[in-house]
Image: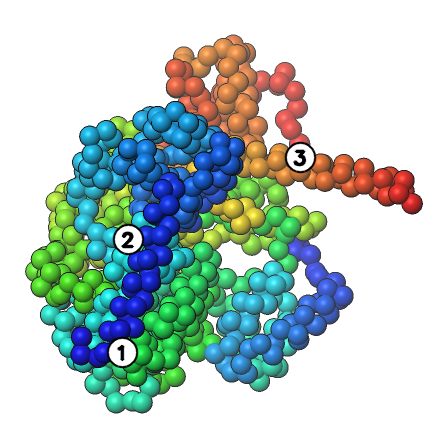
Amino acid sequence: MANKTLEARFRGLRREAERRVQERQREGVPTISIVMSTCALASGAAETRDAIKETLERIKVPARIVPVGCMGHCYAEPLVVIDHPASGFPPICYHRIDAGIARVVIRSFFEDGDPSFEYVLGALEENDLVPPVTQFPRFNLEERVVMELCGRIDPGDIQEYIARGGYAALARALDGEPESVIDTIERSGLRGRGGAGFPTGRKWRLARSARSERKVVICNADEGDPGAYMDRTILESNPHQVLEGLAIAAYAVGADEALVYVRAEYPLAVKTVQKAVRDAEACSLLGRGVLGTAFDLKVSVFQGSGAFVCGEETALIQSVEGRRGMPRHRPPYPVEKGLWGRPTVVNNVKTLASVPPIVSKGADWFRTIGTENSPGTAIFSVVGNVKHPGLVEVPMGTSLRKLIFDVCGGIPGKKAFKAVQIGGPSGGCLPERFLDTPIDFDSLAQAGAMMGSGGMVVMDQDSCMVDVARYFVDFTQKESCGKCTFCRIGTRHLLVMLDRITKGEGREEDLEIMETLSHDIKAGSLCGLGKTAPNPVITSLRYFREEYEAHIRERRCPALKCRALVAFYIDLERCARGCDACVGCCPVEAIFTTKGRKKAIDQQRCVKCGECMVACPPEYNAVFKVSPPERAPVIERPPENGPAPAGNP
Amino acid sequence: MNSVPTQTETEEREMIEAIEAMLPRFAKHRSALIPILQAVQQEHGYLSGGAMERVAEYLEISPSEVYGVATFYNQFRFHPPGRHQIKVCLGTACHVAGGDIILENFERKLGIRAGETTPDREYSVERVACVGCCALAPVAIVDGTVLGHMQPSRVEGLFVQFQVEREREEREKAEREPGGEQDA
């Protein structure tokens, strides 16, 4: 390195971090890592941690308990990793460990030397005793660049990140000219991971050449897409990689101020980032004179207050300024005139987290991953009807089929794949024939969907595409800021028609009107919200038109989903005498006993929650759905059953 | 909206006093508006009319500006929340898994609509867009705890649990009171 102070400072930091991390490991004390991200906590990780602590105290085994971030395996939570080299076992990852199982596993591991194979997901290293996770298709197909350290380090401990090579990219960037950092990013071909795919290097260069004393860099973590949660996970699991990327971006464009804009709905992410900023400042990695150089960077955390449209950069800037988050016309682009009129770079969490590995390993390395025009990896949250939902990081260009069936285990319950909704409310629904499409910015756009932020909802045969389109239009209609007439009133009108269709009151001409209107909304709206809001309608009309027609012409929902168009009934042939499973679970007491001591549903009273279908024991399997509702056999409630309970819900 | 109780004057006064004490922490600048509103709601659970007027005065902008900004964002609420706050997630994965049925069950059970509070201020129900726990859909957040894989029958179970807790609290309170007399 040319700059001696910088080199000395960073080497000192790194040595200190390595020493501290090794010191903790050298004690011969086992390390137990517990995934403590939001979704793990929802699955009971806190109870698991308490049970592990309590059991270790009882059997008097000292251990280091480390809270780690998400590994992406949401289906397997709570996840626990026991790393105890003295036991002779490699680090073992356990899945679905609730408090009760945790007690059993800890006792048998430390008292009997038995690693309880029935709860093992896999070993984290190659060995002869426990099957390693690397043999699973998910681990084989995944390639982690952004999420490499997620779930492997304590997000609250900056030393762990530094010891694993963290902030080395920042030190390297600071050692060279800002221009050369921009060159590297430009050559790597990194495109904005927020969804639009704008070349990051070009954005930085524009901001660099903008003439202004003071510039700003914003990390956009306003992840409003329902069904997407990778930004939250990255911030909760490895905030320093994002901050490092942010600092490199600021140095490259010449900014002295940076902002992390996180949704207030992600309290854990907010807390983790705030702590990370403080820790990095304490290590002189942010703040005044970063690593002894002349580069200053003040980083603050701003909590977004839950408006979907604030994901749009111009709206986001408005909201930081204390106004309604309404997008404005571009140009001028934020890189010329953004926050407080200063040139502002807005980059997504994933974009920034991709920067440190590119700076460390070089642009050519990055180009070896992914496709020609979309290099690098894509992170998706694959949810809905898949066996193994969670976060997945795969090279760009991986096919949808590989992702859904090989990485995520396919559709559960022997049901058929129907569609995949990509890109959140602004994306589209793709049917089976698109499963071999490679996923990258351009091919998805060609199919009528978009990369968006990377939310992917897989739907099986039981999902109604009209209902899904209605759901997304309802969402975007509620979230429209109201500035453009087409977006405000057009989406409203789309929703009215879709509502009507799902209730069986659709009109033949609705489909034509919806099609025209959708294209008009796209053409007449200012920002990405309006321009993409009709996408779910356009794609579902294109690929699932016969479903719309069944709703309109036959008042029938082929997927048996739209509640106004289905009825539940109990097949008397299959119903068992005296079994009361359905009666007990019905929230509105709609199920009564017929003369033959079998059960029937009072159609007037039924709210169609489907609970009886779940409750009916599988050996009888007597509850059925039909559409249109008139097809359900009518059974009168006998008067001797006593007066109906008062108060019609 | 008859199910939303009006706050008493004392409550409003106390709230304004608390805000008064908190305001000097923030810069007298437009950009502090959202952070201030967030802090007020964090402390008091909602934004009252008086509170928003006080904030407007502090930042020297009109109260309607403050109201206009606050109502634009989903985070802010303008009625006191219930003692138990129930939020039902209606994100995509939750929708596909039947989140609307869960919400409906809460609404039916409490006799209020989403966004309202029961007259005894025990419960409030809200719909939220996505809490990012999609792998556990459908999800409800009850008093800050995320509950995954909700079912209509679990809704019933929750209320039974609340009922049991409430009875226990009342019993303990009743036991404590005669105990206090013995001490005296």
Q: Position of residue A577 (x, y in %)?
A: 49, 10
Q: Chain of mark 1?
A: A
Please give the name of the residue rendered at 43% of the width and 19% of the height, measured from the top-left corner: A617
Q: Quadrant of residue A274?
A: bottom left
Residue flagged by tag 3: what amino acid is it? Answer: Val
Same chain for the residues at labels 2 and 3, yes or no?
Answer: no
Circle 1 crowding by C-alpha within 10 Å: few under 14, some 14–19, many from 20: few
Q: Is there a contact, CB below 8 Å, between mark 3 and mark 1?
A: no
Disc 2 versus disc 1: nearer the observer: 1
Q: Is there a contact, CB below 8 Å, between mark 2 and mark 1?
A: no
For disc 2, the marked residue is A149
First along the sequence among labels 2 and 1:
1
Q: Chain of mark 3?
A: B
Q: Position of residue A164 (x, y in %)?
A: 27, 57
Element at label 3: helix
Q: Residue A316 got which mark? A: none
The residues bearing labels 3 and 1 have C-alpha atoms spaced at a distance of 65 Å
Q: Position of residue A202 (x, y in %)?
A: 17, 75
For disc 1, the marked residue is A5
